[in-house]
Image (tube, rainbow, N blue to C red):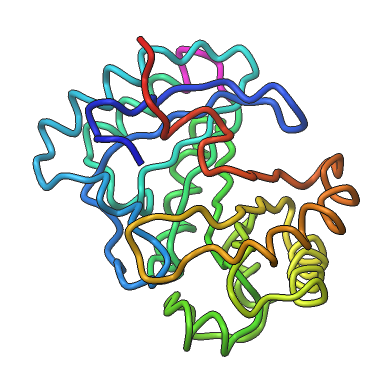
Amino acid sequence: MEKQSELNRYSVITEKNAREIVMLRGNGCAWKRCRFCDYHLDSSPDQKANYELNRHVLKKVTGKYHKLEIINSGSFIDLDEQTVLLIEKICKDRLISTVYFECHWMHRENISAFKNHFHEMGISVKIKTGIETFDFLFRECYLNKGIDTDQPEEIARYFDEACLLLGLPGQTKQSMEDDITTGLKYFERICINIMTENSCSIKPAPKVIDVFINELYPIYKDHPRTDILLNNTDFGVGGKDNE
């Protein structure tokens, strides 16, 4: 990932579920223990500075698709209050009817009230979560994800969409396909992320990625409820800002 100051934080997704997307900055993920993730480094304890950065990004939102996805290296609860108020204003001013937020399992009890708050303004909120895999032992003993249930239907009680992480050591065609089919069974949409090397100890497994690319990608690349990120910047955010 590029330095925070150089990141592109706004993009437009035109395929499948067309929407605008912004990568905001907050306090950072409260979990911070996943062995594969350094995304939480895009954070700051300075709420004033975060708001100023987020305000600059949010002013680019046009509302062209009436849908807005917000990611922020953590959960919606990690965003400062001023930023959340600005998101509400942007949604109302730009006639955005659906807004997507991220949330870790540890904050699941905060979701209902958050959704209801936006619902009162006529805005539908969809919550995405990083499950990575439905293999409980692999997820919790190897990835250290922090989801203390092995029941996908229980996770789906709180979350609308699931993010999967494929291309890891130990995964197989069967395990990856099982994760995809389980995700599609229980969630409205899934986002498949292929592991990209970062500063963490867990690295991508090239042979596993080849299996996905050759045997599973052709099957699911056009699936209407599936987003696939072969690189973690494929949504257009997170890479170098060329402004």
Is residue 151 depicted above or below 18 in this figure? below
Q: Residue furthest right?
A: 219
Which quadrant would residue 164 be assigned to in this image?
A: bottom right
On screen, residue 125 versus residue 50, left or right, reads right
Estimate the x, y position of residue 67 in percent, counting from the top left.
Answer: 60, 26
Estimate the x, y position of residue 156 in percent, counting from the top left.
Answer: 65, 67
On screen, residue 81 versus residue 15, left or right, reads left
Q: Does residue 92 belong to the magenta stretch?
A: yes
The residue drawn where x is 32% and y is 58% is: 199
Q: Does residue 75 belong to the magenta stretch?
A: no
Residue sitting nearer the eye, 190 or 214: 214
How many marks on residues? 0
Which quadrant would residue 26 be assigned to in this image?
A: top left
- Location of the N terminus by quadrant is top left
Estimate the x, y position of residue 158 in percent, counting from the top left.
Answer: 57, 65
Residue sitting nearer the eye, 92 or 220: 220
The residue drawn where x is 33% and y is 28% is: 7
Is residue 10 depicted above or below 2 in this figure? above
Q: Residue furthest front?
A: 207
On screen, residue 22 versus residue 172, left or right, reads left
Which quadrant would residue 125 be assigned to in this image?
A: top right
The residue drawn where x is 49% and y is 58% is: 112
Residue sitting nearer the eye, 87 or 47: 47
The residue drawn where x is 40% and y is 34% is: 23
Please state the extent of the stretch shown in magenta in the rendering.
91-96
Residue sitting nearer the eye, 227 or 156: 227
On screen, residue 27 versus residue 115, left or right, reads left
- Location of the C terminus by quadrant is top left
Is residue 55 depicted above or below 170 in this figure? above
Estimate the x, y position of residue 100 in percent, counting from the top left.
Answer: 54, 40
Is residue 199 depicted above or below 23 in this figure? below
